Structure formats: C-alpha cells, structure tokens
Image: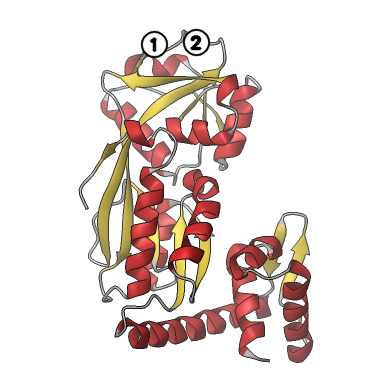
Amino acid sequence: MNFKQLESFVHVAELGSFSKAALVLDIAQPALSRQVRALETDLRTTLLLRNGRGVVLTEAGQRLYEHGRNLMQALAQAEADVGGRRDEPLGRITVGLPPSVGRQLTLPLIDGFRRRCPQAQLAIVEGLSSHVSEWIATGRVDVGLLYNPEAQPALEITPVIEEALCLVSPLGDEPAGAALPLADLPNHPLIVPERGHAIRKLLETRALLAGLKLDIAWEVSSIAAIIDLVCAGYGHAVLHASAVAASGRADALRVRPLARPALHSMLCLAVSARQRPSPLVRQTTALLTDLVRALPQGAAARSQPG
C-alpha cells in the first residue's frame, strides 16, 4: 500500500463514484480504477462494491476510509501550516455542498480551484445542511454551504445570499407572475424533500405558525427528481428560483413567489471555529462566495455582508 493508492481510494469513497473522483483528481478513470484495485490486491480484501449508481464501502473499506481520511487531513494540515508562511494555498481541502446547489457549483468550483490553487487538492461531498454542519464540526469537512443554519460554538458562519422561496408548478397550471399567498398553499399538492431538508423544515415551521396544514403528496430527496415530477404533473414544489433556473427545465415550469408573508432561505458559508483558517481555506471560501453570488437569479438575491 502506498499513499497514492490510499488517496485514490479516499476520494472514491467520499464521492461515491470513480468518475467524480477522476474529475477531482484530474486523472483518467481507468488509471484511478487500477490504483484502487492494486490497493485491494495488496490488502487481500474487497474495499468497494460497484453498482449502477456508483460505489459503496464494505466493512473493511469503511475502516480503511477512516484511517485514510485522518492521515490525509494530518498531511494537509502540515502542508497548510508550512505553506501558510508563504501565504500559498497548499494541501487538501474538503468542501461540503447541499444537493440543491451541488449540481450548480461542482464544475465551476473545480474550474476556479484549479486556477486559484494549482498546488492544492480538492474533494467535494454532498449532504443535507444538517449533515454538512456536523461534518465540519467533526473535521470531516473543512468548508461548507448551509441553508438556515443554527448557531453553534463549533462553527463560524457567514451569510452569503438570501433567496426567496417560490411555488413551482407545471407550465400553464398557474397564472403567470402572480404571487401566491401562503394561506393558499394548502390547496396545492406538494412534492417535498425529506424532513431533515432545510426547505422542508422552514416551510413546515411557517405553515405551523400560520395554522395551515400542508398537502404533502410525495416525499423525494433529489431536487432534480422533484423538478421532473412537477414537469410530469404529479404536484407542485417549493424551491428557490435559482434551482429552477439551473435545472435546464425552466421553460416547462411556472415559478410564483410566495407572499403574505414571503419566505426567504439564507445560504451561509461555514468553517470550523476551532482552527485558524489556512491560506487554502481563505482562498476556497472566497471562491465559494463569488460562485454563490453568481448563481442564476443571484442578482435578485439580497447579498449579505462578509
């Protein structure tokens, strides 16, 4: 076993896919597969199970992943500490993104990271805001984007943009441009994410305070799948306009802002409050802030200081 093999394995394990890991590491996918196979041969055990959606860790793979992640974090910290004296972004950084913006940000984040931090390495993981905040607190993730985070001592949180929530309907199903009063929302069967999702929590909290009972028709984790179901006529969704604009299906959808009261979701940048930010962390947070504020519909969002 060598460090290159271990690094390849950790990236595949974190991203759940050989193709995504190859993109992040900037190597050919067959070469990446050979690195992992060689590691499995050296250890005489299966570390990853391949399926149609990507890969999952075996029990042995999970144990090696924990060791490998800790080793890579220690090495990245050492490189960052030494490189920080020259203010150079060196080492390895893991960024956590919520699924609603992961698809929009992954490619521009990798492109921008290559230009700004050519000597550093980047890993990207996706998870609900509640999961990303936990990962930052425990050291698995260095920088993350969170929707509507709760204050906690382990995190340093900076608001980036505030976005309005809108009712998303099939084209022609709703009058164009007309705002929808929140009191009318129960008349629309909704396709919503699972209960841990930030939008779901905000929506149900506001409905409860207003004494409204929402019509939850379907629960679906994927934002892309929710948009597909809305287009197919299975119901309506409550999403950010930027998510619709980035879906590639905006022409098939009608987007109406919620009103009386309007609902807004805050997207924030979070880092660990326990560690001094390295040059790599500072460069990555600056890049993420620029990318978030350039999202579709971002000009309509109210930028926050910091």
Q: Residues within 10 Å of mark 2 (few under 14, many from 20)?
A: some
Where is 203 relative to 106, above or below? above
Image disc number at residue 174: 2
Q: Mark 2 belongs to which amino acid?
A: Glu
Q: CA distance from mark 2 to mark 1?
A: 8 Å
On the image, the x and y values in percent for residue 215 come to 48, 22
Q: Residue at x 29, y 22 (%)?
A: 211
The residue under label 1 is 178
Q: Residue at x 44, y 22 (%)?
A: 167
Residue lying at the far left in this picture: please name it: 305
Q: Residue at x 32, y 75 (%)?
A: 278
Image disc number at residue 39: none
Give the left or right position of residue 172, taking residue 115 as reference: right
Q: Residue at x 55, y 53 (%)?
A: 107
Residue lying at the far top in this picture: please name it: 175
Circle 2: element type: loop
